[in-house]
Amino acid sequence: MPEPGRASHGECDVNVLVVGYNAFDVIVPVDGLPDPDSKCEVEAIHHGGGGPGATAAFCLARLGAAVKLVTVFGDDEGAAVQCRELSAEGVDVSHSVTARGHRSPQAVILADPRTEQRTIFWTRGGLPALDPATMDPAWLDGCDLLYCDGHDPIAAARLAAEASSRGLPVVLDAGSVRAGAAELVASCSDVISSRGFAPTLTGIAEPLAAMRGLRDRGPRRVAMTFGEAGVVALDEDGGSPFHLPAYVVDVRDTTGAGDAFHAGYAFARARGESWPDALEMGAAIAALKCRDWGGRRGLPDLPTAEAFRRDGARRSERPDCSPR
């Protein structure tokens, strides 16, 4: 497994601008939730950088892309850890800003490898949103793709509109609906939705119909992730759905698996791979991430990812596409 600082820049010609969220994560391995008023000894407690956008930037850099990250950092120890990790992996944070006197978002994650489940306690911290007026179109010069995690949709939409006008792919990790999400979606070419995003944004409960409603808002490529049951996507022409199963790995921790999926997809998309092939790359990266604790320790380099994508076994689960 590659160590931080061993990003393989130069293996491919991929340049990505990432706009998104960062957090400081503490991961506690557990065997089930503890009883109230008890003490539980664990073998280790892991900590490090997290957050969808920052982890995607880290993942893209480890795969060999040149990555610029636009985010807001606090000025506490959590932010210092983030900056060290990202810079060591080769992520350019020079376009990010530091909010003096503000706390970083933080999460405490109880991860149970036996059930492949986790419980997250988190706080948003005190960071201000990215200022839309400061989003500089020149940041897109030389980029092959814009990646947004949807946490600052109003600011991200400024860059997404510019990227779209240049004919660049705009990939959205569509996790939760926030103010400005609809405008951001309209400027995106590729939207990969969580189980809840498309139904919430469109008001359509049935997942496949919600995905079609999402595509009616602008993006050509729309998919929805279902965790261990894989991903369902609409084909690029007639909108017929197809299913890609997840890969099999020995799961330690699923924290950050979605971030890894979206980053792997974006990397393949920036290289010009087909819609199904890029989704397969996302699935492979997500599975490999789950081998280790936290959102970043298990992220693979490009040769590891490509070998696993070619030879890895697939899970048998199918998604439940009934309305919730």
Image (cartoon, helix red, strand yellow):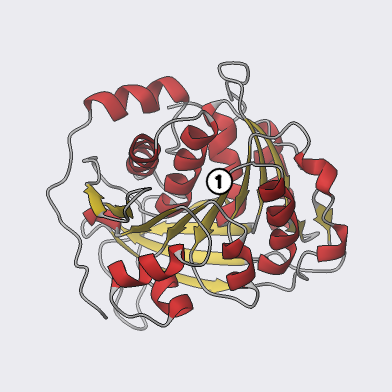
Looking at the picture, how far across and down is residue 37, in whole percent?
Answer: 37, 83
Is 271 placed above or below 294 here? Answer: above
Residue extending furthest top?
11
Residue 113 at least partly seen: no
Q: Residues within 10 Å of mark 1 (few under 14, many from 20)?
A: many
Secondary structure beneath label 1: helix
Whether residue 141 appears in this view of the structure is yes
287 or 158, which lies in front? 158
The image position of residue 131, as x and y in percent, is: 82, 65
From the viewer's perspective, is 225 left or right of 243?
A: right
The quadrant holding residue 87 is: top right
- Corner quadrant of residue 30: bottom left
| Number of numbered callouts drawn | 1
- Residue at the image position 44 percent from the left and 71 percent from the top: 197
Q: Amino acid at mark 1?
A: Ala
Image check: 253 left or right of 86? left
Percent x, y for residue 26?
52, 58
Tell me the residue at 37%/66% (across/down). Answer: 212
Q: Quadrant of the C terminus?
A: bottom left
Where residue 103 appears, as percent x and y from the top left, is 74, 68
Point out the image quarter for the N terminus.
top left
Say which residue label 1 marks: 56
